[in-house]
Amino acid sequence: MDLIALGFATLFDPSVILMLVLGVAAGLVVGSIPGINDNIAFAVFIPFSFAMPPEQALALMVGVYCAAAAGGAIPAIMIKVPGTASALLTAVDGNAMARRGEAGKALSIAMTSSVIGGIASSLILLVFAPMLATVALRFGYVENFALAILGMSSVVGLLSGNVIKGIASGLIGLLAATVGFSLTTGFPRFTFDNVNLIEGIPFVPLLVGLFGIAAMFELLVDIWQERKAGRSVSALPAIGSMRLPRDLLRRLLPVWASSAIIGNLIGMLPGAGMLMAIFLAYDQASRRFRRCFAGKPGEADWGEGAPEGVAAPESANNAVTASSMVPLLSLGIPGNSTSALFIGALAIHGMVPGPLLFTQHGDIAWMIIVAFLIANLVMWPIAFLVIKSVSRSIFAIPKEAMAGVIALLCMLGAYADGANIFNIWVALVAGAVAYAMRLANIPLGPAILGLILGSQMESSLSNSLSMSRGNWLVFIDPANHPISAAMIALSLLLWLLPVLGRWRRSRRASLSQEAA
Amino acid sequence: MANSDISRPSALARSDLWVGAALFVIGLYACWEASGFDDDSRSYPMILGGLLAAAGLAVALTGLLKADKALCLAGPLRVALPAAVVVALWATALGAGGGFVLPTLLMQIALLWLGGVRGPLHIAVYSALITAAAYTLFALVLDVRLPAPAVSWLV
């Protein structure tokens, strides 16, 4: 308790709290610009923090880290271009809501969900950080492989249409993740003698292309079709009212709770990353939506503007921001790429994350944890101010001019990740592939998940098998690897539940037919 | 959206047939390429390539057997393809030392025209504003080293 009080005392210095608030505002603004992801936002602010005292600098970075993840939802909802990778699923239902005139409601759900996920995660971090770190330590190669399998199984919720195409999409992602040096022998695979591919396909340009450039193509075709049909080109959605009715808040409560729990659990696992959390949360929310609301009058289909489709990923991604600090602060292991940059910010000020951080710099370590809670508390009003002012100005740009804006921001965002022209080509090819996949009705989600989990899956599989001398049963060994066995069982359930549900529905239908 | 432009196609015009065939070829190619890797690095991509080929075959067969719909490609070919070419030319110009401002202005003019903006004044004002805003944000605020021009008088 004394340590938490020490954290609060350090944070509530006026200059430190001011930096935190500035970081939140800056993160929201940067996150809301399409093409500038949270890694770039974070990297931009690190040099600013050089000259500051460590507590001010780290408060600024916590604010940017929390808010950039939330701000990414704004362009995702308004123009279907996620500002950050963590908002890629928000773009699906959020943009559908915006297109039917509920942009303000979608933005409000996104911000409220982010704040709730972030606060829940901060409280858990505050109370359980040292205990959670011991759970994270139990994750070895076997558990990591099982976790990757669980992550891939979460795509089941996304495959409402053609399952084979969904599986093919996942395989494309896994195959693309093998590009680059082999993790076991260093053999160059699918690099075509191009040095830029030695470490794999650059991830930031790839994501920028898959979402931003594909959205640009879609927007241009949309305008062309409106003109061809003789209609005047519709404007970008207006933001409108941001009030959330009380019954909607009640309806979203279970989604926020389950997504925050998923975000916390995934965030504290080293290397699991934010994207796996949002996919798992989205999958859970889709199951609840189909069970409770699908088909009812006035309800949109899943993926066509369901409020749960915005609430789940946004709550989960901000829950990850704080919980990813568990392995980072206590073990020195980053939970995702942005939290890896956090290590850089700490190192600049002479601090090394790990168990010693709490003994040598207890005031700073606990201030960081407390800062996550306060950053999420102040984010809600600041987010509304940013949406009402900055975002309104950005999205007042005419729809016809928006394609050029998206293309330029996305391409420069891709280029800025290493100042390499090759990244622009990666983004362009990825955008063309994503657009072709959309035309062919191949879902993009499984491919993204395959890309993210591919290398983790391969390395943990090969290491697990070599440690167990080729024994495949190691993954379901409840005595030595109970966590892995539980996750494999859960993955199986995720695949079996829809099949069982369909079988039950058809059986019920045939019974009622017989009765009639 | 493009998906709304659909019509009843002949067997060869069914999109799933071609999508499945493309996935099948990509999967087989991945298998063939992976067969040249060393012993420890080949099995994982080979398995993935084989599974992708199988999935592609399944998609193609489903497309042949089911009354599939074909997508109208007029929009993508008339607008998306030229836009991709414009961006590719812009990237080539940046790489060839054309500087940032001139290629970006030209790209914006082309994309604005493709987006349906008409009138030289509108196009000139929008393209200049977008280029200036992007330059300010990336070069001046974010301190990104933009591609260097081959000649000193270009920016």
Image (tube, rainbow, N blue to C red):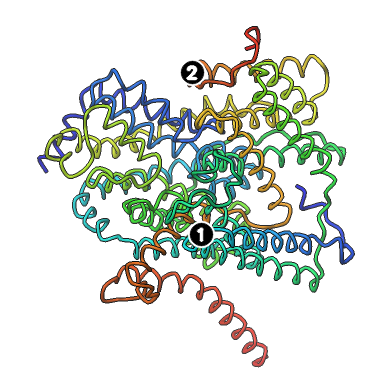
| Residue at 22% across, 36% down | A352
Which residue position holds label 1? B38
Dot 2 surroundings within 10 Å: few (below 14), some, or many (20 or more)? few
Classify the position of the C terminus of chain A by image quarter.
Answer: bottom right
Judge by depth and name the residue closer to the eye, A261 or A296.
Answer: A261
Q: Chain of mark 2?
A: B
Judge by depth and name the residue closer to the eye, A337 or B115.
Answer: A337
The quadrant where residue A99 appears = top right
| Vertical side of B75 occupied by B102: above or below | above
Q: CA distance from mark 2 to mark 1?
A: 47 Å
Please tell me whether mark 2 or mark 1 is closer to you in this view. 1
User: What is the x, y in percent for residue A72?
Assistant: 50, 38
* Mark 2 touches mark 1? (CB < 8 Å): no
Q: Secondary structure at mark 2?
A: helix
Dot 1 surroundings within 10 Å: few (below 14), some, or many (20 or more)? some
Classify the position of the N terminus of chain A by image quarter.
Answer: top left
Let me know if residue A296 appears in the view.
no
| Vertical side of A29 occupied by B34: above or below | below
Question: Number of labelled discs?
Answer: 2
Q: Chain of mark 1?
A: B
Q: Secondary structure at mark 1?
A: loop
Which residue position holds label 2? B141
| Vertical side of B142 occupied by A501: above or below | below
| Residue at 63% across, 64% down | B52
Q: Is residue A218 left or right of residue A378?
A: right
| Vertical side of A57 occupied by B53: above or below | below
- Badge number at residue B148: none
Q: Are marks 2 and 1 on the same chain?
A: yes
Let me know if residue A292 appears in the view.
yes
User: What's the residue type where badge 2 is placed?
Assistant: Val
